[in-house]
């Protein structure tokens, strides 16, 4: 059977936004050498031109993969988001074109957790105000408004991988931890679940947010929720920018309802370092502002580089989609003396029977078959005896099956 998958050195990979060299090294170690490694993001026609002949692309948070970009990338077979979030990608469009998207949901967990703990300490000690004062020539050694974190209550909104790590670190420093999550989660250590968001807000000296960007979480913390917090409490957001009403937060900080805040993510962020950052929180002396760097440590980026590159290579080499965020997940055994056939199709009745009938009519014996579907697409992987011959008519017949999005043979 002819190998329709390109040789590895012909598969073109384009990496944007200064993705860690670990990713490049991983690709090279697995035989992929046709790599373009760009320092920044592109958009518009420049992005279209760059991805036109790409088979795999890697991005971080600034590159926007919209339908026009996908339609321009006619050879594209997979996308890697070298970050946690995938909001910058039109996932539905990618799926309908048969393109799985992979990300790194856990590799920067520790980095974000450590930042949250550091900000908790700095806010409780009043460091933002004192740092501003020293820069202005002031010398305020007063203990007013400066507190230890030991014995204070940290409220975690969201108790997933990051929230639970923050919980462990906070408890090790003597804090009491409460959490609220819409999904029931097993408490770690002495952390205590709350029945409602308002219960958590009323109980916490510091509230830290660890939720995804969904229609339900947008505007989760607004004027009413801030009013439910303790007077003099602090708010930390290193999750998603649209979770907090920034105007309501700025107002609460100006009138001392809240004693401080640390914000790493914003509803509207600059598209590049050349664009000025705008926020009503600028200039407030009781606020720590950081430019979306929660996961930006060298250790995290190195881990992300390897994790996402590994997922892309596995998909290219053997068709595994484990870890895809927009695609049926199929975990596959390594190929052993077989030719592997990958078929992506719209999830409509009758496709599988036509595929099997085609193999049967050509006298091709199937040694292994793996199928997974979601409401939109079906993904079938078929292993057959290695080196079986099938002509161009067989391949054309596969492509002609109604609902076919794309197919590939791996030797």
Image (spheres, grey):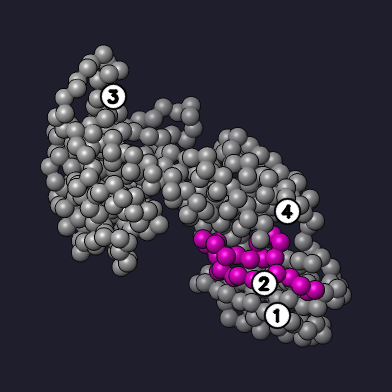
Q: Image check: 4 left or right of 73?
A: right
**Highlighted range, magenta:** 315-338
Mark 2 and mark 3 lie on one chain; the one further toward the N terminus is 3
Residue indicated by mark 3: 131
Q: Estimate the x, y position of residue 392 in percent, counting from the top left.
A: 84, 70
Element assignment for label 4: loop
**Can see residue 378?**
yes
Q: CA distance from mark 2 to mark 3?
A: 56 Å
- Mark 2, residue position: 333
Q: Secondary structure at mark 2?
A: loop
Q: Which residue carries the number 1 mark?
A: 368
In the image shown, does 256 or 95 lie closer to the viewer?
A: 256
Q: Is residue 359 left or right of residue 230?
A: right
**Inter-mark Cα distance, 4 to 3:** 49 Å
Which residue in the rendered view is the most extreme toward the top? Answer: 137
> Percent position (x, y) of residue 370?
64, 77
Disc 2 from disc 1: Cα separation: 10 Å
Q: Residue at x 43, y 34 (%)?
A: 270
Task: Work out how far the residue at label 2 is from the one at label 4, CA to CA, in angstroms.
Answer: 18 Å
Q: Are marks 4 and 3 in contact (CB under 8 Å)?
A: no
Of the pair 266 and 44, the residue shown nearer to us: 266
Mark 3: few, some, or many residues within 10 Å (few <14, many ≥20)? some
Q: Is residue 375 magenta?
A: no
- Tell me if mark 4 has few (under 14), some (14-19) or many (20+) residues whose alpha carbon lies within 10 angstroms of its own: few
Q: Assess whether mark 1 and mark 2 are in contact (beta carbons under 8 angstroms).
A: yes
Q: Is residue 322 magenta?
A: yes
Q: Which residue is mark 4?
A: 30
Measured from the top left, where is residue 57 in percent x and y? 63, 48
Disc nearer the start of the sequence (3/1): 3
């Amino acid at each position: 059977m002819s190998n329709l998958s390109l040789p590895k050195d012909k598969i073109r990979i384009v990496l944007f936004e200064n993705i860690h060299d670990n990713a490049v090294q991983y690709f090279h170690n697995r035989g992929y050498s046709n790599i373009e490694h760009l320092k920044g993001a592109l958009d518009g026609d420049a992005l279209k031109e760059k991805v036109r002949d790409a088979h795999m692309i890697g991005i971080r948070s600034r590159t926007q993969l919209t339908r026009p970009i996908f339609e321009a990338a006619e050879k594209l077979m997979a996308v890697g988001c070298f970050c946690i979030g995938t909001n910058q990608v039109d996932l539905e469009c990618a799926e309908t074109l048969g393109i799985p998207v992979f990300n790194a949901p856990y590799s920067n967990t520790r980095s974000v957790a450590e930042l949250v703990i550091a900000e908790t300490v700095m806010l409780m000690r009043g460091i933002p105000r004192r740092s501003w004062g020293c820069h202005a020539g002031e010398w305020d050694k007063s203990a007013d408004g400066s507190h230890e974190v030991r014995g204070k209550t940290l409220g975690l909104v969201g108790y997933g991988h990051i929230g639970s790590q923050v919980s462990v670190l906070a408890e090790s420093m003597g804090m009491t931890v409460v959490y609220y999550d819409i999904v029931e989660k097993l408490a770690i250590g002495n952390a205590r679940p709350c029945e409602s968001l308002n219960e958590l807000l009323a109980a916490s000296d510091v509230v830290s947010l660890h939720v995804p960007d969904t229609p339900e979480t947008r505007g989760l913390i607004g004027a009413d929720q801030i009013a439910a917090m303790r007077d003099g409490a602090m708010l930390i957001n290193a999750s998603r920018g649209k979770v907090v009403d920034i105007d309501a937060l700025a107002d609460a900080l100006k009138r001392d309802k809240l004693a401080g805040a640390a914000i790493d993510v914003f509803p509207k962020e600059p598209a590049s370092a050349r664009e000025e950052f705008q926020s009503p929180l600028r200039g407030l002396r009781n606020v720590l502002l950081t430019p979306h760097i929660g996961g930006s440590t060298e250790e995290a980026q190195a881990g992300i580089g390897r994790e996402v590159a590994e997922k892309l290579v596995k998909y290219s080499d053997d068709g595994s989609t484990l870890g895809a965020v927009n695609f049926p997940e199929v975990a596959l055994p390594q190929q052993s003396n077989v030719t592997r056939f990958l078929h992506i199709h719209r999830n409509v009745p009758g496709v599988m029977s036509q595929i099997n009938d085609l193999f049967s009519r050509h006298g091709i014996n199937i040694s292994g078959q793996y199928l997974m579907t979601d409401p939109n697409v079906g993904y079938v992987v078929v292993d057959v005896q290695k080196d079986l011959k099938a002509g161009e008519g067989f391949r054309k017949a596969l492509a002609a099956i109604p609902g076919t999005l794309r197919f590939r043979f791996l030797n």
